[in-house]
Image: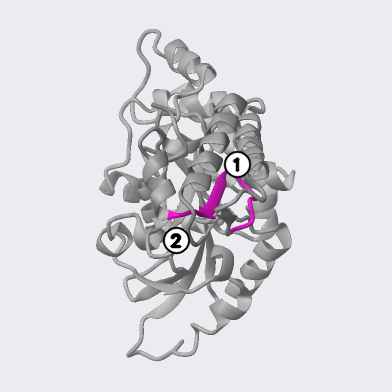
Amino acid sequence: MKGFASDNYASAHPDVLAAVAEANAGHAASYGADRWTARAEELLRQHFGEHAVGFLVFNGTAANVLCLRAMCRPWESVVCAAGAHIDVDEGGAPEHVAGVKLDAVAAPAGKLTPELVAARLGRRGDEHAVQPRVVSIAQSTEVGTCYSVDELSALADVAHEHDMLLHVDGARLSNAAAALGVPLRALASDAGVDAVSYGGTKNGLLLGEAVVLLRPQLAEGFVYLRKQTMQLASKSRFLAAQFIALLEGDLWRRNAAHANAMAARLAAALDGAAGVRIVERVEANGVFAVIPAAATRILQADWRFYVWDPPSGSVRWMCSWDTTAEEVDAFAAAVRQACASTPGPC
């Protein structure tokens, strides 16, 4: 049963599967000493900047945790938006594994601002207080909004002004780049970002993410951190082959742009519908709306999606690289019908 629950539900792109199958011929050196891994690392450098150093890992939680381990010492903290993935959806891994304190800040539209960050820095230099070291943002955010290049640069500036670093949880960085019409590096090294967790799983891969460190000193000793955090793949070629398929051409952009377009199509189809109130700007591949609770129950009998905030009735509808226009139209019609038959506050 297909639906709009998560881009993690989507299938793997055929080009990715073909690349894995092609890499499956014969033997290859293990633990990244193979030509596929070397090529994937080269492509990450091409896309993220000449000083970028890429490391392949299995999943997004590990990518985020490893970035924070590389950027923080035990007495330091991470300023993030309340509701960010690292704050609420990683089982406490940043605190437990990376050993860093998260300082979650209420952020309109899911986006931190220089003013919000500066307000958390009042106890810098106080030995009794944890010391802020990293500003971590999600791009696109957990509510589907995107930081502009200027907004990113402003956050990088305030971070660097206070001897801090800027990390981007880029599980959907490709969606943000496609939405803004810019290359990946424009949202990374060009904007002053210091480290990126670059997502592949939500954009057509079987599994796999990349840690991309944009300050060479952050990469010192990182191979040991990756091994210690249990993220060194013995058969690295199969992770790498997927990233080659994604990054060697424009598959990363095509997949992301299609998912974004399907979200925009869904939002447009529900614009003005009775009982539907879209509550966040639709800028990437997610639509956030409030609908009557009874309508949610009716729809979830046939369609998969998540209730984002039960008290308000907010729901999240995510589109993927393999979402079709026909599915969007059918779902929009079902939403209209369910909301019309169950009037209530929205």
Q: Secondary structure at mark 1?
A: helix
Q: CA distance from mark 1 to mark 2?
A: 18 Å
What residue is rendered at 51% in x and 29% in y? 243
Q: Is residue 202 left or right of residue 235?
A: right
Q: Is residue 69 left or right of residue 163?
A: left
- Whether residue 282 is in magenta: the answer is yes
- Nearer to the camera, 238 or 146: 146
- Nearer to the camera, 253 or 339: 339
Which percent across, then down, holds residue 312?
Answer: 44, 64
Which percent across, then down, holds residue 174?
Answer: 60, 41
Q: Which residue is mark 2?
A: 84
- Whether residue 170 is in magenta: the answer is no
Q: What's the amino acid at mark 2? A: Ala
Q: Which residue is mark 1?
A: 174
Dot 2: few (<14), some (14–19), or many (≥20) neighbours within 10 Å?
A: many
Q: What's the amino acid at mark 1? A: Ser
Q: Secondary structure at mark 2?
A: loop
Span of residues in magenta: 280-292
Q: Is residue 214 left or right of residue 32?
A: right
What residue is rendered at 31% in x and 61% in y? 98
Q: Nearer the viewer, mark 1 or mark 2?
A: 2
Which percent across, then down, holds residue 305?
Answer: 42, 42
